[in-house]
Amino acid sequence: MCFPLLPVSFFQHTRCPVLYFVQLLYFRHRCESVTAAAYPHHLPLQRGVHLFPFSSFLLPALEPSPSLPPTVSISYIPGRRPTKTMGLSNRNLLLISSSMVHGYGYLDHAADELKAILHSAVAKRVLFVPYALRDHEGYAEKVRAPLKQLGFEVESIHNASDPVAAVKDAEAIFIGGGNTFRLLKTLYDMELIEPIHCRALQDGVPYIGSSAGTNVATVNICTTNDMPIIYPPSFAALNLVPFNINPHYVDPDVKSTHKGETREERLRQYHEEPGTPPVLGLREGAMLRVQGDRAEIRGVASARLFRPNKDAEEYTPGSDVSFLLN
Amino acid sequence: MCFPLLPVSFFQHTRCPVLYFVQLLYFRHRCESVTAAAYPHHLPLQRGVHLFPFSSFLLPALEPSPSLPPTVSISYIPGRRPTKTMGLSNRNLLLISSSMVHGYGYLDHAADELKAILHSAVAKRVLFVPYALRDHEGYAEKVRAPLKQLGFEVESIHNASDPVAAVKDAEAIFIGGGNTFRLLKTLYDMELIEPIHCRALQDGVPYIGSSAGTNVATVNICTTNDMPIIYPPSFAALNLVPFNINPHYVDPDVKSTHKGETREERLRQYHEEPGTPPVLGLREGAMLRVQGDRAEIRGVASARLFRPNKDAEEYTPGSDVSFLLN
């Protein structure tokens, strides 16, 4: 069940740290983990909101302990009611690194996986979310063609009179790539974060993400490659998996004379920040399939996993990476 | 003179749009321009702050008109008192694309320009700001060596007991590269935005930026290449120049099989957003020298200028780009 708990927005309004921490402590005692999105450096509270220094001070004490039952996952959505989901066995995700892969047509490398996830839920209609690109209609058209070939209808959310209702009615959701900041800001502006989160985690509606659509499926967008062209109200995202993904992951080019940071160096900078979760680097052609509590690398390229203070690890297609969901 | 006007934080606190717009209208009638940082999509006001929809609606009417006297520049710093600077003739900036350039030692390609800007102000001591990297002490050491060879002393702000006082006493300021988000957040956290802005624009203290230090010198960090590893309270930056810079600018690799966006595509996405200023792409080796109202490309590589709905333009070292300051 996906239901609202105490309204955080009320606490922010009253600026009462005591009430705020009553809530966090309640979470702490009921949950295996308060997700990374609620940790201090991800806290969506703004500077100037009185809670911030207080929560920075206290939150380290709220780190999860392994003795608590793994029954509840909390998604803390800034300025909105937090959601609580009991059991994640319905989770049905396909997180694609990129729709375009060298040597393949648009989405071709993912055709089998797209059919599999949609057939698994007997879905015939896909709700497409084109907000990461400026031209919504053109983008929906581009995606419509390959999915039609596979036997599925595409309805784009930008044509819906009530986008929230469209999510609630969706048989499957597909969020396309483009600019991650623009995408996340639009999801917040249209109040779609919580409905999509609930549909994917509670109802088991298939969620397909590609590139930016994969970034927003994770705890936050802190490992996007995109340019921050617009300021979202938070970097916290849909939180369908408790770690980060870096789409379009690319190995260092040893012949390059360019001195900008390599992708690995950028991810290591992320892991210098306290409390950051693992980052799964998905090379173009790679994808992650999540079914309940099982996660597996799929596709035509391998993935590279980064964890704080550990050597990077390679995972070829077929590898079980369910441990990342714990 | 650099002095506080009406405290915006008070208006945010009272959430009174009328008082807020009294201030903006006052700016509008006194100024040639209200900088891009105050335009709707850059507005540091958060969703949930009551002003936002109202200001989105009204701000387009506040576009600057060419008939107003070019005497005042406003820097709108979120949650802080705005600053007003009369005349910019003291501005003395060196904005470097990158400290490392293929074929050169660390900062070597910029040695002549570093000497020139520091000698121009008879500065012997440089206040270094290492916040873009985690290891402050190591970073300060790295920068100390080449500057010592040129005859300058380096004091790092992380060793100062009072960082704001250190800025106020600085003979010259050098902000190094690393992660732009970490850098900007630290500048906000330590309340250094306004002091640095005032020292550089009012007092004519030499400002040297490299990479992330160049990003934060502009209107905002929306054209950084860095990963958003931490959430700053705003993307608005020091606003020492009224446009954006993209450091480490790199041309598309025609042989690449990678399908992630090229740098130019990312900058074009920025210009799809309304009201965005020009972006000067500085290739590694290029730098921008600003003296008062004159700006010139310097260094060992050329720059590429992007403007909304226009073809990109090339500027070789020695080119006058003062028009960007208007």
Image (tube, coloured by chain):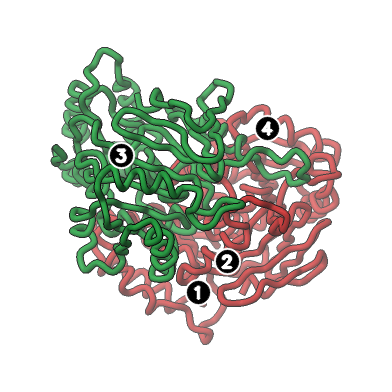
Chain colours: A red, B green
Classify residue A159 as left or right of residue B69: right
Question: Which amino acid, by three-letter code, is at mark 4?
Answer: Tyr
Question: Which amino acid, by three-letter code, is at mark 1?
Answer: Ser
Q: Quadrant of the N terminus of chain B?
A: top left
Snapshot quadrant of residue A232: top left
Please report, as a chain letter, where disc 3 is located: B
Please report, as a chain letter, where disc 4 is located: A
Image disc number at residue A33: 1
Q: Is any atom of residue B78 visible in this view?
A: no
Sort mark 1 into few (<14), some (14-19) or many (20+) by Cα contacts within 10 Å. Answer: many
Observer-nearest of B270 and A133: B270
Tell me if label 1 and label 2 are in contact, CB under 8 Å: yes
Quote the CA–CA distance across marks 1 and 2: 10 Å
**Above or below, A153 relative to B133:** above
Q: What is the count of numbered marks?
A: 4
From the image, state whether disc 3 or disc 1 is nearer to you. 3
At horizontal 57% and vertical 66% (from top left) the residue drawn is A242
Please report, as a chain letter, where disc 1 is located: A
Q: Which residue is mark 4?
A: A139
Do the residues at pointers 1 and 2 share their chain? yes
